Amino acid sequence: MDLFEYQGKQYFARYGIPISPGEVADTVEEAVAAAERIGYPVVVKAQVQVGGRGKAGGVKLAADRAEVELHAGSILGLDIKGHVVRRLWIERATDIEKEYYASFTLDRAAKLHLAMVSARGGVDIEQVAEEAPEAIARRHVNPLDGLSLADARALAEEAGLDVEALDGAAEVLVSLYRCYVEGDADLVEINPLVLTADHRVHALDAKVTLDDDAAFRHPEWQEFEGTGEIDERERRAKERGLNYIGLDGTVGIIANGAGLAMSTLDVVNQVGGSAANFLDIGGGANADVMAAALEVINSDAKVKAILVNIFGGIVRCDEVARGILTALDRVELSSPIVLRLDGTNAKEAREIIAGRSSDKIISEPTMLSAARRAVEVAGAGLGTETVGGRS
Ligand code: GDP
Ligand code: MN
C-alpha cells in the first residue's frame, strides 16, 4: 500500500523524523484556513501518488492569503500524469540551504536492506541516478546488525553531505531505518531531505510503501485504507471475490490455479505479447465465476484479446466449456476470446466450444498455440478499425 505524502509524513513523525507542521485541505477555503493557522509563508502541495509533482506545477510557495487562494485553486483538479488532485497538504515553508536524498528498501537479490543516500537530492534525482550513479552512496544493512548512529554518519559522509548536516542526517537515517523495519515498510524515501538555513536536517517530502503482508499486526493502518488510489479494475475484482492483479498489457488472462496463471503470463510474454492482468479463478471455473472474471477483464480498455487457459484436473473441461458459454451469453465482450481447455473431458469441451466458434470465440489445443493466437489477435486489434491487418 502506497501512502500519500501527508500520510507518509505522519508515519515518519511517529519515529521521530523531523517534518514541517502542516494540515490537509480539500478545498480552497480549507487551504486558506490551514495557512492562517500555520503562518506564512506556506507551501501548497498536491497529494497524488506519483513523483514529479514539483515539475508539474503541483508544489507552490505562497507568501500570503491571496497566493494560497491562487495556488490552491490552480492545483486542486490539476491532472498530474493521469492523477487528478483532490487533496492538498499545506505546510510551513522551509528555508532550504541544501537538498539531499535518503531511502531504505529491500535488495531482494542480496537478501539485505539497502540504504541509499545522496548529496544531490531534489527533483532531478532520477537523472542523477542515471548520469552519475556514483553520486549515490549505497550500503547494505544486515537486519541482524541494524544501523548504528556511527554507520549512518559514515554513510552520510560517504555520500558527500555537508559537514554541518552530518549529525542531523545520521539521526534521521537511524530513525528512518526504524520506521522502515518496525513500521513494516517496503520502501521509505525522503527526497528532498534538506539542510535548512539554520542548519537543521529535515524531511521535506515522504514516500512510504507499506508491506501489505504485515497489515495483520498494524490495526492502525486502517486509517490509510480507502484513501489510497486503487486500481478501478482491482476494486471490481475484489467486489467479486476474484484473485486479480492488474498489469499494463493488452492480453486479458483467466487461468485456474496461480501457477498456471503465472505460466500463462510467461508464455504470453515469450511469444511477444503482454498480459493485462493476473487472474486465478481457482477450482471454481463455473459460469458465475467465469462471468465475473470476464466482466472485470472487459472493463479494461487496454485489453484487445482474452486468453482463457484452463487445465481440468478435478474440474471437468466440459463443465467449464458450458460455464464459459453461459458467461458469454451474459457478458458482451469487446474483444475476442481464445480458449485453451485441456485435461479431463477436454475433447467434449472442444466439441461444445466448436458449436459456437467464430472469429470472436477461438479454440486452441495447446497453451503455446493459444498464447500465440491471443497475442496475434491483440496485435491485429481485431474488432477495431485495423481489422484484417494480419491474418
Ligand atoms: P515532488 O516534486 O513530487 O518530489 O515534490 P517535493 O515535495 O519533493 O517538492 C519538490 C520541490 O519543491 C523540492 O525539491 C523543493 O525544491 C521545493 N520545495 C518543497 N517544499 C519547499 C519548502 O518548504 N520551501 C522551499 N523553498 N522549497 C520547497
Ligand atoms: Mn520529492
Image (cartoon, rainbow, N blue to C red):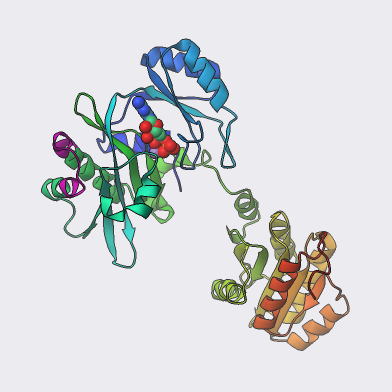
Residue at point 45%, 46% (across, down): 2
Residue at point 56%, 21% (across, down): 73
Q: Position of residue 180 (x, y in %)?
A: 30, 48
Quadrant hosting residue 387: bottom right
* In the displayed structure image, the side of residue 163 where residue 106 appears, left or right: right
Residues 199 and 298: in front is 199
Q: Position of residue 205 (x, y in %)?
A: 37, 36
* In the displayed structure image, the side of residue 360 where residue 197 appears, left or right: left
* In the displayed structure image, the side of residue 123 where residue 98 appears, left or right: left
Q: Is most of the magenta stretch helix, strand or loop?
A: helix
Residue at point 80%, 69% (across, down): 389
Q: Is residue 92 above or below residue 326?
A: above
Q: Position of residue 142 (x, y in %)?
A: 21, 60
Q: Is residue 352 in sight in this rendering?
A: yes
Q: Is residue 13 above or below residue 107?
A: above
Quadrant hosting residue 108: bottom left
Q: Position of residue 69 (x, y in %)?
A: 52, 15
- Quarter of the image containing the C terminus? bottom right
Residue at point 35%, 49% (across, down): 128
- Is residue 115 within the magenta segment? no
Residues 78 and 242: in front is 78
Report the residue that reaches farthest toward the right: 355
Q: Is residue 32 above or below residue 117?
A: above
Residues 381 and 310: in front is 381
In magenta, the rendered stretch is 155-168
Q: Is residue 316 in sight in this rendering?
A: no
Q: Quadrant of ligand 2?
A: top left
